[in-house]
Amino acid sequence: MAQVTYVEAIRGALEEEMRRDDRVLVMGEDVGAKGGVFGATAGLFQEFGEERVIDTPLAEAAIVGVSIGCALAGLRPVAEIQFLDFIPPAMDQIINEAAKIRYRSNGEWSCPMVIRAPCGGGVHVHGALYHSQSLEALFAHVPGLKVVIPSTPADAKGLLLSAIRDPDPVCFFEHKALYRSLREEVPEGEHLVPIGKSRVAREGADLSCITYGATVHEVLTAAERMGEDGIEVEVLDLRTVRPLDREAIIATARKTGKVLVCHEANLAVGVGAEVAAIVAEECFQQLDAPVMRLGGPEVPAIPFAEPLAEVYCLGPEKIEAKLRQLAAY
Amino acid sequence: MAQVTYVEAIRGALEEEMRRDDRVLVMGEDVGAKGGVFGATAGLFQEFGEERVIDTPLAEAAIVGVSIGCALAGLRPVAEIQFLDFIPPAMDQIINEAAKIRYRSNGEWSCPMVIRAPCGGGVHVHGALYHSQSLEALFAHVPGLKVVIPSTPADAKGLLLSAIRDPDPVCFFEHKALYRSLREEVPEGEHLVPIGKSRVAREGADLSCITYGATVHEVLTAAERMGEDGIEVEVLDLRTVRPLDREAIIATARKTGKVLVCHEANLAVGVGAEVAAIVAEECFQQLDAPVMRLGGPEVPAIPFAEPLAEVYCLGPEKIEAKLRQLAAY
Amino acid sequence: MAVSESAPAIAADLTQDQLRSMYRDMVLGRLLDERILVLNRQGRAPFAISGQGHEAAQVGVGYALRRGHDWLVPYYRDLTLVMVMGMEPKDHLMASLGRAQDPNSGARQMPGHYGSRAHNIVTTGSPVATQILHAVGVATAFKYRGEDKVVVTSVGEGGTSEGDWHEGLNWAAVHRLPVIFLVENNSYAISVPQSLQMAVAHVADRGPGYGMPSATVDGGDCLAVYAAAREAVDRARRGEGPTLLEAVCMRLQSHSSDDDQRRYRSPDDLAQMREHDPLERFRRQLEGAGVLSEGDADTIRKECQRVIEAAQAEADAAAPPDPATALRHVYQEG
Amino acid sequence: MAVSESAPAIAADLTQDQLRSMYRDMVLGRLLDERILVLNRQGRAPFAISGQGHEAAQVGVGYALRRGHDWLVPYYRDLTLVMVMGMEPKDHLMASLGRAQDPNSGARQMPGHYGSRAHNIVTTGSPVATQILHAVGVATAFKYRGEDKVVVTSVGEGGTSEGDWHEGLNWAAVHRLPVIFLVENNSYAISVPQSLQMAVAHVADRGPGYGMPSATVDGGDCLAVYAAAREAVDRARRGEGPTLLEAVCMRLQSHSSDDDQRRYRSPDDLAQMREHDPLERFRRQLEGAGVLSEGDADTIRKECQRVIEAAQAEADAAAPPDPATALRHVYQEG
Ligand SMILES: Cc1ncc(C[n+]2csc(CCOP(=O)(O)OP(=O)(O)O)c2C)c(N)n1
Ligand SMILES: Cc1ncc(C[n+]2csc(CCOP(=O)(O)OP(=O)(O)O)c2C)c(N)n1
Ligand SMILES: [Mg+2]
Ligand SMILES: [Mg+2]
């Protein structure tokens, strides 16, 4: 097994799957000669040519809409939206078209496609308001879609392979702070991680922290620190935010009786609200404390200047403080 | 006071405000000569002319984007999106532009505008998948927006006047099943209902049902039936789903200790999840039962054929059954 | 039918049988359309959207395609066109009456939302112009696989104002894809006249700006549309890329059963339109050319009427969808 | 500066002072742009986006406007243009260094996201082409209030592929609004060449399809751009509607500090471009016409350098934003 970064894992998954299945195409802005602004498609253009790795016009609705057409006609497109912040022009094609094709045709048509996009920010990312957003809630609300947000290189590969082979449209959001910051062993070849199944990233008996994406690592850091004081935090990495892994959410909540839900995205009407609502409804008898949430504050996105970005971002300190508050309840 | 329908109340509010303030313009598809597909702008074209009541090209991003430009230049546009189902092409202009203009300019620019759209469906509405959606969660998630969903003619007028005068962008969603089905006294002239304040539509000591929009009336019917059996349901009409009236939500939850949140929109990652999460976090000590939710099932929208539509829609029976389940907890 | 085989050729590459069949398809479309409006007025079909006045254009385009080979991504006015592609009156009556056997959607969608895998008609929703991009994707797949298929997608002139339309035409031109963008220009988008929709006289004026051949044809002239469509299809099949084809049509009925066009169109305008009914034009043309003899038109009409009666009987007897199915097909099952 | 007043008129309606001022603005833009790139390479400015190669076009357009009266809805390459409108080097250095005094956004946005109420520059975000529609709305307000103001909005040729661009041009043409759509065509959208962006040679080829006058001008020729912009502005001010103006520019630097254009452009291409630097062209032109005498260019350069040094000193000393303000201005306060 090779030690690879998150972005290499994605690149590798695309490459392997394109070799295996010639129905797989990649399209997006700058995915060709340049290999993508983050290098996620580096080398694919050279290997597979301009018919399979398409540098598209600057038009997100078209990237998704044309991909839908490809899927309807039997291909397996992987569309890249350069930044998740720029996915809103394609919302109609995603919500009203891709998500509804199977249902509206009573099962006669389907739309197997993947929409990849880098998401999220951080204090040192400097992406500012339009290169930092975490918009997964907008898609997690929509029946017909699946929404995957891997937190590790191995998951990035395994979930991307599953996403490309999935018979339905999958939104695949990659936190850009993870692209090069992590390196781990990633199984070569066929490595499929199922969509819709979470992962216990750390076992613990005292509290549960349910999270996903880059925040998993911040939570793990906070959990380690708590562990030094003998408070054991179980960390559940959701991996998929639609459909949610209800069983695992309920299991960890019932096990520890204290739950914090944590994400970088804005809090209100977010994925965390859904998780909290599930826990509140399903684990009423087992909870020893109110289910708590921690997430992006009530501002549109992460500002440019570091002192402002810090206010937005979570980080292990804020998470630890909240976990301690919950532990003390 | 005149007895007016919901759609007449909206028309009246537009008319009054256009007479009072010549910065107010109306624009949208078919809002002019035809007076809107539901008649919400009937007569305005005749009174105010084509410069103030603009029949736009068929382009939702443009309707919102041009309205933003008008607002930036000092006007008070009221944009109509013909059906809420057709708002996704304008999502980028709403989420990335209107919602972020004040924040991104550090308070130097603002975007006072209203986006009106008919939403929702029903068993006899026959609007099918694309003339029935309740997409408020997508906007309720977004800082910088306000989202108003009135349930009565008087509120429709009072909230629309407040929305037009609001210094920030307001999404104003009107349930089409209400347009002509209700008639009530609506104060003439200046009648302002504040954005962000809910209303107790029915007092009760045993259970709380938190809801909004057309569902309010279904909940009231269910509550009356329960009342006949001596179970008193308090009904909270949120009126505004962003910002939520946290105080009132918490107050009713603490009062009764049993809460059902109810809406027509899809349940997962919906407004109800946020309300439930707030209740779960803030009223942990006072709850006598798990906070429950009832909402649209996991399908994209309301199907055309009545037998299928019935499966989607709530209606007083399903609500009553759920309330009784909660009461029995 | 006793038709002289020596009748003057009015379309070089169409046989007399084809011409008669074209007329028959127009009549079938019209009569079915009328029947659906009646069902709506009777309160049996909750919603109806009419294609009356567009039949000649649709038949002209449909006959330029290879049935069972080429693809169509239609819009809601294409009742006649989807029948040329292979759908049947029964299918539409099932949809109008909300029957489980509606092949488009199992009565999940409103009538007029076409889709049929059997006939290469892509599933369509309501949002105007989204289908344009799907057609470009379908054409991408054809080109990628080296197939000699062509896809037609249609939209109204109002739909050309949507961003998706622009993005689709531009993309198809860049990649020289085998797609024909048919615009059925009936000069109204619900109540909005063309003058408020665009500042040009013809949608086809936009072709050069995309680097795409384009043409405006009289959509009431079936054979003119056929000829223009044929040229576009041949070009696409030769790998020479897309065409923008504008057919100038008339919307004889209101936008839909929820609309009343007398509220925004003058009586004169409406009356004048009716005088140019494309069905009559084609009948006169075929009779003049001896393709139809006296009585033929009547015979055709009656035959179509019978087909519709039989279809209606079937649809009447058919069952609504089972509520137990309402939650199915959100994702692939099993 | 000792300039002969009898120098041949190279632009009928521009004085020699104006011409010198135009050159000075180009130099100021270039030097500031270079300074910002240096700050980026030093690790002091986390992000930089360069307008080098676009200065002549921007000055040409800017001088056609009435400062303090007309409006601008710019895009991220318009460093020089926003300075013509009234912004100052200090403003941009504040933004680059993330200072609270960044007048565009208080360092909430990346540098290059312009906005200034004082100078009629509308606040802009990152999504490409959204600003087009805002400009149409601003022009709607001008027309509605009967003001004789004009608004210019700019975008790259890549941005013309977005639906918003199409919707904006179409709307403005229908309503004959006083807006000028400036496309700064530098033939690349990050790495994507024009040939993959559109199937036409000139963006201006799209004008007729909207029923809108359009022109392609050499964006390296400041006075040609000025003349074309002047015509467009005059037309708009007379109430005769919008213009599509394409200025063919060069992107001398990589797309942004996160890009390296050597990875997708040939060394030849890059070298050739530099030979046509618009600054040099304009200097030679002005010297040839006697508007600049020997030494003038050098004097101007030094003066600009001094302005930038002073600005930098101010920006260096300025404070970052107070974290306590991070949650403000989501909605109107109080
Ligand atoms: C995105 C979107 N916006 C609005 C509508 C509502 N609507 C349906 S058809 C129509 C008018 C279409 O006019 P045109 O494109 O000219 O086609 P026609 O109906 O005249 O054939 C409108 C506004 C819609 N279905 N989708
Ligand atoms: C909607 C959207 N999609 C993608 C991007 C990322 N992006 C920023 S600039 C750019 C290229 C723009 O090229 P062009 O319009 O030609 O302008 P230029 O940078 O060449 O001046 C891209 C793809 C964005 N900012 N917004
Ligand atoms: Mg039309
Ligand atoms: Mg460019």
Image (spheres, coloured by chain):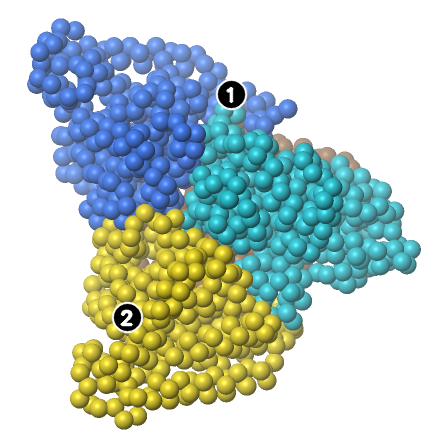
Chain colours: A cyan, B brown, C blue, D yellow
A244 lies left or right of D69 = right
In the displayed structure, would residue B185 be above or below residue D12? above
Q: Is residue C58 visible?
A: yes
Q: Amino acid at mark 2?
A: Asp
In x, y percent, where is residue D265? Answer: 44, 57
User: Residue C321's mark?
Assistant: 1
C283 lies left or right of C199 = left
Q: Amino acid at mark 1?
A: Pro
Residue under numbered circle 2: D221
Question: What count of labels does the image hold?
Answer: 2
In x, y percent, where is residue B296? Answer: 59, 37
Q: Residue at x 67, y 35 (%)?
A: A189
Q: Is mark 1 within 8 Å of ligand 1?
A: no
Label 1: how many Cα within 10 Å (few below 14, some 14–19, many 20+)? many
* Residue with the most extreme bottom position: D2
In x, y percent, where is residue B274? Answer: 65, 50
* Residue with the most extreme front position: D268
Measured in 3D between alpha carbons, the distance from the residue under mark 2 to the one under mark 1, in whole angstroms, is: 68 Å
Which structural element holds mark 1? loop
Q: Residue at x 66, y 55 (%)?
A: A180
User: Residue B254's mark?
Assistant: none
Chain under numbered label 2: D
In the displayed structure, would residue C334 be above or below residue B129? above
* Residue with the most extreme right position: A230
Quadrant where the C terminus of chain B lies? Answer: top right
Q: Residue at x 89, y 58 (%)?
A: A228
Question: Based on the displayed image, in which of its 4 quarters is residue C216 positioned?
Answer: top left
A262 lies left or right of C3 = right
